[in-house]
Image (cartoon, rainbow, N blue to C red):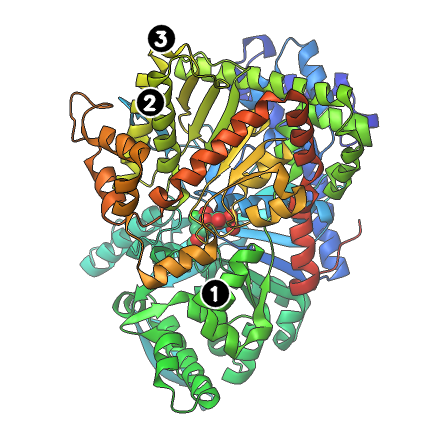
Amino acid sequence: MIKKDTFDKEKFKKELESNVRMLFRRKLEEATPQQIYQAVAYSVKDDIIDNWIETHKAYEKQDKKMVYYMSMEFLMGRALGNNMINLLCYDDVRETLEELGLDLNLIEDQEPDAALGNGGLGRLAACFLDSLATLGYPAYGCGIRYRYGMFKQKIENGYQVEVPDNWLKYGNPFEIKRDEYAVEVKFGGYVDVEMHNGRQKFVQKGYQSVRAVPYDMPIVGYGNHIVNTLRIWDAEAINNFNLDSFDKGEYEKAVEQENLARTICEVLYPNDNHMAGKELRLKQQYFFISASVQRAIAKYKETHDDIRKFHEKVTFQLNDTHPTVAVAELMRILVDEEGLEWDEAWEITRKTCAYTNHTIMAEALEKWPIELFSRLLPRVYQIVEEINRRFVIEIQNKYPGDQEKIRKMAILYDGQVRMAHLAIAGSYSVNGVARLHTDILKKRELKDFYEMMPEKFNNKTNGITQRRFLLHGNPLLASWVTDKIGDDWITNLDHLKHLKVYVDDEKCQQEFMNIKYQNKVRLAKYIKEHNGIDVDPRSIFDCQVKRLHEYKRQLMNILHVMYLYNEIKAHPDMDIVPRTFIFGAKAAAGYYTAKLTIKLINAVADKINNDPSINGKIKVVFIEDYRVSNAELIFAAADVSEQISTASKEASGTGNMKFMLNGALTLGTMDGANVEIVEEVGKENAFIFGLSADQIMEYEKNGNYNPRDVYNNNQDVRQVLTQLVNGFYSPENPELFRALYDALLEKDTYFTLLDFDSYKEAHNRIDAAYRDEEHWARTAMLQTASAGKFSSDRTIEEYAKEMWHLEKVTL
Ligand code: Z2T
């Protein structure tokens, strides 16, 4: 059923019935929705398998270079709908199920999201895999098969409660365990030197180890029969130890190793843009990297005999510094196991690894205490020491006598291993994720490294896959676009620009806005079901969905809502376009201020939504458990996309692109990829406000911003701030939001108060603009028409051509 014209409905029905019988001993009529989901998934998998085998045969035969995308996170979301879309059988399956009285949407809803990621970084990895397969590039995603992914969020009494995400409970129909590729990964112990044929050999002894076992998930390319692989590693205990053993030491070690295996893959660390610094996290990093690198080398050696040419066939892309131990692990294997000289090994390593930086937030910078690092990875640490020793010499040669340079650039310093420095030293490429971000890396954060090795630095502006975020997430708009300009946009998003001839066409404007309206009705229904709140689909849907972080300034958004509410109360006849403010955000479990902000949003929502005197002019909705699957509904329904980070702090953002693709107008600062979005759509077609990155960085340098000045001079700001501490939104505990109040008045690290007036004024512009229906429709359509650049297909082509030098496979 791979091709539209060969889909056989009756055959599919038979398969489905047979799957339900074999898997659950049931007739289709008796099967639960979950069982039907499983049965449909197995039918789809059946269609994937042959292509999967053929793809890998072709890779082997054509012997093309392969990228290994190394990432602690892959935020895949649901697989079923996406796979059917890319197999070109989505509509056929939907119709066939309809004939059986089954609703495909409800069946898709049975699948848990594969939430093996926090936010942008993890979702970017997922979009990249989709694009790599669609473009026909040989690629593996390498990661961890967390037993529990990103926690599920419940809202209780307005507070976030974290619930474990048992995503594997009913099994994962798409994964295949590959026991034959299991490898051993060693931790701890000590390093011994042995002599082998007159040569020193370093051997790790007294270690604990686990068996790393890969599970493969298919990554289906769009309509091209290519199926790549996401390989996620699970840990198993290495020795099924002998219960007869009376050797106490052996027994204890066996139990410890069982525990180690159980804990390593247990759970994803739920921090976005923040380093946890836990020993278990470093174990996770080394676990999946050692396994992936060992496997990559073994695979290479199956068909090549000269390890010195490894980099000609393999490249490792390091998704932030989390996988950076790969630099040292590759060195270890090349030197200790392959017997190469240091210089040879180092050249191969530097030509194999490339590093992507995703943030300049200081608290996200990975630094491991040497004590911990060397205890856990004794041999790898020795190698890091030698890398550092040579790197310091390089610095000295370049800047003789400059101690300051060494202090700033060394890999080992102040009792810590600085992972970004290791990544830069060990890579042939260092890239940022949006033009502004890369410029800031070059000019400030990584200035010294840029000056020493400018040739390594480059930009790759992020992108998103239109297959999930338009074709699957917004079927109405997708088929409208195809009606207008054909379906080339599905694999070449630049084609969207052909929509520009329609932006002034009144009929097209009406069609476009009618689709937006229907998507708003769909979201309103979801909100009614999940929140019990009635929202008016004719109101402006103003959305901010992303991880909760102070730099993203959800607090500024809700403070502005509080201000608006005050205005409406003070002027009951005030003429404003009804607005629905929609939030969705998870806070890291230990991030107090973020959690308090969620409580504030919910407290404001309770008060405003239940105040009949404002006639429903504004509503506030907090969508519980924001994740990939419900994100698709939100992007499709949005009128306004809130991208309001403090300028310079958001490396790129990718939600901004998903909103744009779906016709939402951006309300944003000149930060991250917003800069490039505005460049594509035109400044007059976005609501831009706030201080620039340069201005922010200038204030930070001089330390001359005092939030109290704003407080003293701005009555509106004073009023909303006072309402944080006078019980207006928390009568039972007036002090509840004191911490937010203090953070704003004492430091206001993220310039919320300084940007507030400008933000307010931008909101006024939105209110005015929405009244001109035609002009709004035109501008909304223009967003979609201008989104071509932000396809992850474009991003991946840039990586493939400018960095990896990959060739496409031919099937
Ligand atoms: C993350 O999602 C991002 C950066 C990180 O730095 C960590 C995580 Cl978990 C270590 C985000 C950025 O904040 C965002 O601006 C960017 O669009 C995204 O990565 C993908 O590059």
**Viewer-closest of 673 and 396:** 673
Foreground disc of the pair 3, 1 = 3
Q: Is residue 303 above or below residue 406?
A: above
Q: Residues within 10 Å of mark 2 (few under 14, many from 20)?
A: some
Q: CA distance from mark 3 to mark 1?
A: 59 Å
**Mark 2 element type:** helix
In this figure, which residue is indicated by the disc labeled 2? 566
- What residue do we see at 44% from left, 37% from top? 759
Quarter holding residue 598: top left
Mark 3 highlights which residue?
Answer: 612
The amino acid pointed to by label 1 is: Ala
Crowd tier of the residue under label 3, counting other residues whose Cα lies within 10 Å: few below 14, some 14–19, many 20 or above: few
Q: Going by the image, does 138 lie left or right of 649? A: right
Q: CA distance from mark 2 to mark 1?
A: 55 Å
Q: Which residue is mark 1?
A: 326
At x 59%, y 38%, the residue is: 686
